[in-house]
Image (cartoon, rainbow, N blue to C red):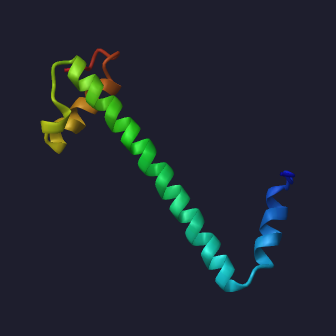
């Protein structure tokens, strides 16, 4: 398969040549792709946080939202003297 390299402005020019219906389809596909990537990153982050909680003797799955926020805040500031 031949791979074509285009500049961003060239891609935009091509998109503008599509019918409004095809532009909407393209937009919906881009939105689905972005959402899937976001969900994958969120899942990976939550798995990492659950592991860090377990290492520190906490159960991420049973923590309240407030407890989770406090835990993440502690992680972010653990190298500072203001840590609880």
Q: Quarter of the image holding residue 11?
A: bottom right
User: Which residue occupies 28% across, 25% down?
Assistant: 51
Question: Percent position (x, y) of residue 47?
Answer: 33, 34
Question: Percent position (x, y) of residue 39?
Answer: 42, 50
The correct choice, above or below, for 4 with respect to 80 in the image is below
Toward the bottom, the furthest residue is 20
Question: Percent position (x, y) of residue 7?
Answer: 84, 55
Q: How many marks?
A: 0
**Quadrant holding the C terminus:** top left
Residue 63 as seen in the image, left or right of residue 79: left
The correct choice, above or below, for 6 with respect to 14 in the image is above
User: Which residue occupies 26% across, 30% down?
Assistant: 50
Q: Which one is in front, 35 or 67?
A: 35
Residue 21 as seen in the image, left or right of residue 11: left
User: Which residue occupies 82% across, 70% down?
Assistant: 13
Question: Percent position (x, y) of residue 79?
Answer: 35, 15
Q: Quarter of the image holding residue 43?
A: top left
Residue 78 as seen in the image, left or right of residue 68: right
Toward the front, the furthest residue is 1
The correct choice, above or below, for 72 with respect to 55 in the image is below
Q: Quarter of the image holding residue 28?
A: bottom right
User: Which residue occupies 60% across, 71% down?
Assistant: 27
Q: Which one is in front, 75 or 46?
A: 46
């Amino acid at each position: 398969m031949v791979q074509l390299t285009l500049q961003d402005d060239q891609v935009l020019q091509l998109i503008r040549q599509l019918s409004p219906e095809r532009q909407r389809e393209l937009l919906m596909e881009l939105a689905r792709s972005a959402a899937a990537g976001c969900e994958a990153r969120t899942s990976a982050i939550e798995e990492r946080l659950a592991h860090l909680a377990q290492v520190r003797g906490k159960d991420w799955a049973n923590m309240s939202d407030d407890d989770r926020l406090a835990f993440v805040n502690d992680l972010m500031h653990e190298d500072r003297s203001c840590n609880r």
